Image (cartoon, rainbow, N blue to C red):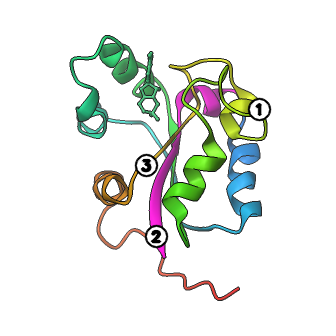
Amino acid sequence: METTLIFLKPDAVQRGLIGSIVGRFEAKGLTFVGMKLMNVPKDLAEKHYAEHQGKPFYDGLIAFVTSSPVFVMAIRGVNAVAVCRTLIGATNGQKADPGTIRGDFGMSGGYNMIHGSDSLESAERELALWFDDGELATIDKTL
Ligand code: CMP
């Protein structure tokens, strides 16, 4: 069983897509163990995207994710990291497959609506950044 960190970026929240996107993870059979709407402090955005520091899009990315609220989720399931990345689709909405979240809802590479941890190691690091100790629910789903 894995837990992964997903957040809906300001564009998805402002476009009123929270319900549509959350519904896809729920329908897939994944379990939510954390959920919250929050403004992102700049230092959290910088820690989260540390690997992109120095890239041409970095400053714009930090400005974007701190511009208005994001919707953060901790999602649990068997192979949840890879399953969520498959549901999300390729980075650029123009290239993402139809049926994926980015493929169905977006046209942009920067304003790409959603983040999902790219490995179990990233998920552990990101969950610790976005959720406090004891904040996640301890649900054991048996279905
Ligand atoms: P995310 O999955 O959150 O991880 C890094 C983010 O950087 C990515 O989604 C995009 O929002 C952004 N990003 C990646 N490549 C580019 C790019 N070429 N131009 C602008 N933003 C980018």
Check disc 3 and report the residue beneath it. Answer: 117
Q: Residues within 10 Å of mark 3 (few under 14, many from 20)?
A: many
Residues at marks 2 and 1, CA–CA distance in whole angstroms: 26 Å
Question: What is the secondary structure assignment of the residue under circle 3?
Answer: loop
Q: Residues within 10 Å of mark 2 (few under 14, many from 20)?
A: some
Residue at 28%, 27% (x, y): give it: 52
Q: Residues within 10 Å of mark 1 (few under 14, many from 20)?
A: some
Can residue 75 be spotted in the picture?
no
Position of residue 30 relative to residue 7, above or below, is below
Instruction: Please provide the residue range marked out in magenta.
Output: 1-15
Q: Is residue 60 left or right of residue 107?
A: left
Which label was assigned to residue 2? Answer: 2
Disc 1 residue type (three-letter): Asp
Disc 3 residue type (three-letter): Ser
Residue 116's x, y, as percent? 49, 46
Q: Is residue 77 left or right of residue 3?
A: right
Disc 2 residue type (three-letter): Glu
Check disc 1 and report the residue beneath it. Answer: 104
Residues at marks 3 and 1, CA–CA distance in whole angstroms: 20 Å
Between discs 2 and 1, the one toward the N terminus:
2
Residue 7's x, y, as percent? 51, 44
Residue 43's x, y, as percent? 23, 34
